[in-house]
Amino acid sequence: MSNTCSLREEARKAKNRIKSGFWAECKEEFSETKERAREQGLNESKAGRYFKTQIEAKIEGRQEDEFYLKVKQMLLSEGEVSDAIGRLTDKAYYETLSYEEKQRYTLSLSEKYLRALEKFRAECEFECLK
């Protein structure tokens, strides 16, 4: 029964988006974004994918995670630094780990940082189109 309620709720939200003109606005904004990307010599396809992820996040109500916000703040204030992983490491937690766990933690942190950096670069590249 709870699946039915959540499905009904999602259907209601979708209907409200249609009634409010959300999709018409999205379509218009999408066309404008692609046009501005073309004018600036940016890849229209990449701009479209970026715009699509922004719309999906808006519909789902996704919030930026704490790690990404920390990386973004670091990049905005200091740019790309050579010791980014060290700055992002939770020192107290790191000291409690064994050697192997420290290696896994560092690799995991590095992977998360690279994803956040990629997201930040895309944000910077396409936010100018709005």
Image (cartoon, rainbow, N blue to C red):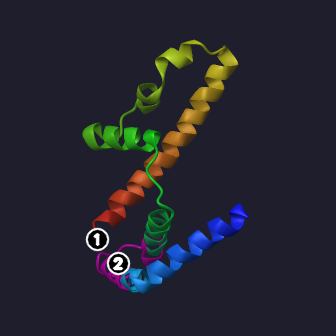
What is the three-letter code of the residue carrying label 1?
Lys
Q: Are marks 1 and 2 in contact (CB under 8 Å)?
A: yes
Q: Main secondary structure of the magenta part?
A: helix
Q: Residue 37 in the image: state x and y as whole percent.
A: 34, 76
Front residue of 38/13: it is 13
Q: Name the spot of residue 46 as percent of width and height, x first.
A: 46, 71
The residue at 39%/54% (across/down) is 121
Which residue range is magenta in the image? 28-47
Instruction: Report which residue position mark 2 lands on.
Output: 33
Q: Which residue is mark 1?
A: 130
In which quarter of the view is residue 20 placed?
bottom left
Residue occupying image coordinates x 37% and y 58%: 123
Q: Secondary structure at mark 2?
A: helix
Q: In the image, 50: left or right of 6?
A: left
Mark 2, residues whose alpha carbon is within 10 Å: few (<14), some, or many (≥20)? many
The answer to which of 55 and 19 lies nearer the viewer is: 19
Q: Amino acid at mark 2?
A: Thr
Q: Secondary structure at mark 1?
A: loop
Q: Is residue 33 magenta?
A: yes
Query: Does 121 appear in magenta?
Result: no
104 in relation to 126, above or below: above
Q: Position of residue 127 (x, y in %)?
A: 31, 64
